[in-house]
């Protein structure tokens, strides 16, 4: 029989646990993890991180709290996994519908609308948790979110890089600043919704936001360059028709 070294809990109220989560050994274990993540998402969304407890998560599932600790070392690890899965869903949705061959503005419109909609689709709970904890310097939970935030901003970074390569997006600014230009206003909009806790017309907000962002993002003379391309395409089409 192998021995395990006892470790201190990663949050208050949890027993000493192994440094590694037990790998699912069966379909039943995999289903248990899915259930814990589903109910964990509900509880964290409803109560935030501080007020959420592994005891309540276990009670909602009708299991013992010890069973939670079989798969997760504590509340923090479970919360990070919940947010990780949530971010994965957001990234998948942004990438799945992103019209990469369309104009940079059309791609930006898709990204902004999808971002706002999915951040609020679970209600304001998870959104508030991510925004508040993500700003907490030196807090372990907030620090755990950093790699996840880099992952979910990747589609935007790729969009901006493609736009610069095509000459549609200004190239006189580094990508990280352009990323902040897009994410900053969206974060403020999300904060307003969370703080006011009232419905918002996401389509109207997204339309206005994209209009504002594109004015700042577009490369100089973008419209003129597009007209020149259209002129060249029409000229080529006319030339082909004459030769036919």
Image (cartoon, rainbow, N blue to C red):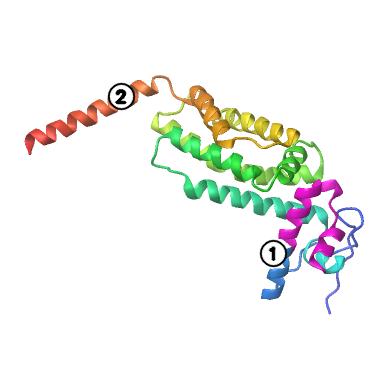
Q: Residue at x 72, y 46 (%)?
A: 126
Label 1 element class:
helix
Q: Residue furthest left?
A: 243
- Whether residue 171 sits left or right of residue 124 in the image: it is left
Q: Nearer the viewer, residue 3 or 144?
A: 144
Find out whether residue 42 is within the magenta segment: yes
Label 2 element class:
helix
The location of residue 192, given as percent across then percent down, is 70, 31
- Whether residue 101 sits left or right of residue 148 in the image: it is left
Q: Residue at x 67, y 30 (%)?
A: 188
Q: Is residue 153 above or below residue 7?
A: above
Q: Which part of the image, by quadrant, shows the C terminus?
A: top left
The location of residue 66, given as percent across then percent down, is 86, 67
Residue occupied by mark 1: 34
Number of marks: 2
Can the viewer see residue 56? yes
Residue occupied by mark 2: 227
Q: Residue at x 69, y 64 (%)?
A: 34
The image quarter containing residue 204 is top right
Q: Earlier in the sequence, mark 1 or mark 2?
A: 1
- Whether residue 122 sits left or right of residue 73 in the image: it is left
Can the viewer see residue 18? no
Q: Is residue 129 above or below residue 60?
A: above
Disc number placed over residue 180 in the picture, else none: none
Q: Residue furthest bottom?
A: 1
Q: CA distance from mark 1 to mark 2?
A: 52 Å
The range drawn in magenta is: 36-62
Q: Is residue 221 above or below residue 23?
A: above
């Amino acid at each position: 029989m192998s021995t395990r070294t006892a470790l201190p809990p990663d949050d208050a109220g949890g027993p000493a646990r192994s440094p590694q989560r037990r790998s699912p050994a069966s379909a039943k274990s995999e289903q248990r993890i899915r259930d814990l993540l589903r109910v964990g998402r509900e509880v964290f969304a409803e109560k935030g991180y501080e007020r959420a407890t592994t005891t309540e998560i276990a009670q909602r599932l009708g299991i013992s709290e010890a069973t939670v600790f079989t798969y997760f070392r504590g509340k923090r690890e479970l919360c990070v996994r919940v947010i990780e899965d949530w971010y994965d869903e957001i990234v998948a949705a942004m990438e799945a519908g992103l019209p990469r061959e369309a104009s940079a503005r059309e791609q930006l419109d898709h990204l902004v609308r999808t971002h706002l909609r999915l951040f609020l689709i679970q209600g304001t709970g998870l959104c508030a948790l991510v925004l508040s904890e993500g700003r907490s310097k030196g807090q372990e939970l907030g620090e755990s979110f950093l790699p996840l935030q880099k992952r979910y901003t990747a589609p935007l970074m790729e969009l901006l890089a493609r736009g610069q390569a095509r000459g549609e997006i200004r190239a006189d600014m580094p990508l990280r600043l352009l990323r902040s230009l897009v994410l900053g206003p969206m974060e403020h909009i999300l904060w307003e919704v969370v703080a006011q806790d009232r419905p918002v017309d996401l389509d109207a907000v997204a339309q206005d936001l994209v209009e504002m962002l594109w004015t700042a993002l577009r490369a100089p003379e973008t419209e003129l360059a597009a007209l020149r391309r259209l002129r060249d395409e029409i000229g080529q089409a006319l030339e082909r028709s004459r030769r036919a």
